[in-house]
Amino acid sequence: MVAAGLTASAILAIGGCQTAETIKGSATAMAKKAIGATAAQPKNDYNITVNYELGMHCTGFDFTYCCVLPPYNSIQSQVIKTATGKKKYPELLEADEKDHSVVVDGKKRFKLEYGHIDNTYSEGNKLHYWDIPYDINKDGKYDANENVANAYFTHLYVYKDLKGSNPKNTTADSEKKFVGIQIPIPKDNGPAGAAVPSPLKGGHLHYTGEKGTIVYTKSPVLDNVPIVLTNPGIWDALGLPLTPFSDSVSRKDILGLVESDIQPYQEAWVKMVDAETGKPVIDSHSGKPVQFVGTNPIDIPNCANCHGNKTANGDKYKLYEQERAFWKGLGASDWIADLKATSISIMEMHDDHNGTDFLKNYNPNSRALKNRLGRDPVLCQKCHADNVIGVLNSKKHKDPKTGEEKLIPPLTQAMHSVHQKAVPMPDSLGRSGACQACHPAHRQDRSMEGYPITPDGKNAYADADNRDAAGGCYVGRDVHSNPGKDKDGVGTKEYLNSIGQWLQANVSQIGNGKGGKGLWCTNCHSQLSRELYQRDNLQNAFKQTGKTIRNKSLDEIAAAIGVSKQELIDKYLDPKVVLNSKGEDTPGKSGILLTWAEKRLVPDIAVIALKGNGPMASKDVDGDINVVPLSANPAVDPKSLKLPEGATGATAVPYSAATHGRDYWLSAGAPHCADCHAAPFVEGQGGVAFPINQPGKYSLMRYSKGHAGLACQACHQSIHGLYPVTPDVDVTTYKQAASYNPDGSHGPLKCAACHYTNENGVPLIADDEDHVWNGKPILDDFEGAIAWMHASAPDAGGAIPPED
């Protein structure tokens, strides 16, 4: 391309008879002159970021038997009006105050249409969810809207709206509007239901405003626990029931689906249209509609590889064989028949091990198609607490061996600890292969070659390295697993703390010239994240001021958490399977099992008021217990807090005291960028989304905001699929970053995506006095500019930062 108004004929006229190389050089020079000698400028009038905050979601699609996780994929976006001149600032656009579906740019008003390329519906031949009856009110009959889709979220509620409004300041159940009951969820919509419609097709993104999208749930010790589903200042379509099956591969009936139909990196699209006419807004650079695509990842777990055959069932459990035969007789594909047989296998084993009666009414000779169990489908979170969907209460059960009444463990703890102990699947290096064997690893090209788990449930890389797999939801995809990251997007150093330096040198070996294979799942998902988090009391997270051990040496970190340096390495940094004589992983010795153990450190959630020998608490009109929280930052000095009347003291309490889901999948129990990276290349602190995150502590990356209020995901994409991804596994994300970066690089987003920049890639709005990093002006230092940008980000806890 040449600069506007500078044609090839003009170039020739200026230069006479010149070589192609000379013409190219002249064009470049004149193009630079035409735009004021800047190296780059935005390629788009508007940038619309598109991401799903988890980076990967796995769920089933046939809920006639049971459900571990419901379908739930959001589209999250921010809209940036790019700079229109060398000294002009980009602008983050917000919504009309009265209509949160309308984007406002001065006098211009737009809406954001959204959808998925070749994936416009789910229920029917891709999903059995709304059409599966479930007796929500337990009256023995199925009324309108009584189905699995509405049953799944009945623990969530609002009083008035999705902004946390509670006009009567009450906790009375009679005042609550429960999702799935008073707020039914329409077919192929997200769980916000009619309150804020999020259909798979024909919808518009909704702006979350100053407060975000908030629902409530109930904990064992507190009513009205806020769950921030989406941060403030985000445009979103919430919790879409997306499947990995494109319209073009769907069969006449769900029974015909095969495993190679799965395409996990679904392409979400967001298009800007005129708010009044609905006509596309045309970009002045390309002459095309303002539309962007982004990854919305969804995959199917591999349960059937073990539970659909003798690997899990052995000779003891037989019912799966009859169930499989029934569906094969109806023409089901082998994969579908195996999946249905798997549901029966899991429930038969659960009944045997835990004393449940899921299959009490099951008749393998029944000809029923939808109610094979003779009961409602088993929804795991109706008994197990699970923070990931806001279920904070577990039920109790009697231990079939001892008769002792026990609290049912969190769902994720039960599943991970049982499977990791019994089937650890180590590779030749001792790292558990169960991560990508159970969690899916399908690819967009639909090939099953190089798949990490064999059809009979074995680790395909038992004699090799798990990281040699052909790619999946993380391995061979994410920047931390991408050997080519420095050649295809990353423009700065890694900036690692002592933990990150050790992992790079001894595990990853990417970015240090060793040509390594990257990190493995258990290098991030470990108990170390919790130990670091517990010891944080941050003042500014990006600058890492306050108290932390993250900036210490390995010797100091080991001493702080009470282990030797060697134990820190063996159990926390690179935990391995410790096999016993039965081929199982060994509790007490395995650092992998420590991550899911009952006895381990659980970080603190808050400081609460005390009265006498226990918490200060009261009961509401429904008999629900409510303690008195005093500080969302549990690291503050309790003596500094003002006590309510009647209180005798205050103390910090762990997450396990507030939710039966413990710390799982909350900021306290999940990995952080700050675990390995040095400041300022870290998350901001939490606060807005408490108790998912906390002030004084590092937020989850998916709730963190940085430069100018942009979500960290806006420039880096989402966890498990961070820019730059490898080009062959996740082609959706690979091409996404190039649609923003003027140089066509594959991420993270560079300054020129939104700013006019100089030849160093630094925005021309920078000046030598105000924009300095380590004593050096950033105008001539791209590396310094990136560091300055991260360090100067408003540490606002996820809120929309105030305008300067």
Image (spheres, grey):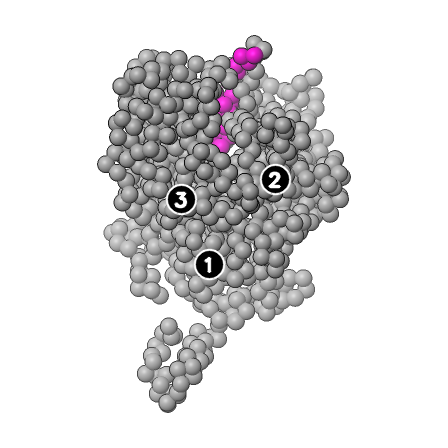
Is residue 544 left or right of 137 when viewed as pictured? right
Asked if one can make out residue 163 in the rendered structure from this viewpoint, the answer is no
Q: Secondary structure at mark 2?
A: loop
Circle 2: residue type: Gly
Sooner in the amino-acid sequence: mark 3 or mark 1? 3
Label disc, if present, on residue 746 of the rendered structure: 1
Is residue 288 left or right of 589 when viewed as pictured? left
Identify the residue under disc 3: 448
The residue at 61%/35% (across/down) is: 577
Q: How many numbered markers are drawn? A: 3
**Where residue 294 sits in the image (x, y, percent)?**
40, 50
- Residues at discs 3 and 2 in contact (Cβ within 8 Å): no
Does 390 lie within the magenta span?
Answer: yes
Sooner in the amino-acid sequence: mark 2 or mark 1? 2
Note whether 65 is above or below 704 in the view shown.
above
The span from disc 3 to disc 2 (Cα, nearest Å) is 24 Å
The residue at 33%/52% (across/down) is: 271
Circle 3: residue type: Met
Identify the residue under disc 2: 430
Label disc, if present, on residue 427 of the rendered structure: none
**Where residue 460 sits in the image (x, y, percent)?**
49, 41
Q: Check the picture and name the quadrant holding the N terminus.
A: bottom left
Please name whichever residue, 69 or 715, is drawn nearer the observer in this view of the structure.
Answer: 69
- Residues at discs 2 and 1 in contact (Cβ within 8 Å): no
Image quadrant in which you'd find residue 256 = top left
Q: Secondary structure at mark 1?
A: loop
The span from disc 2 to disc 1 (Cα, nearest Å) is 33 Å
What stretch of residues is rendered in magenta? Answer: 382-401
Magenta stretch: dominant secondary structure: loop
Circle 1: residue type: His
**Where residue 508 sits in the image (x, y, percent)?**
60, 50
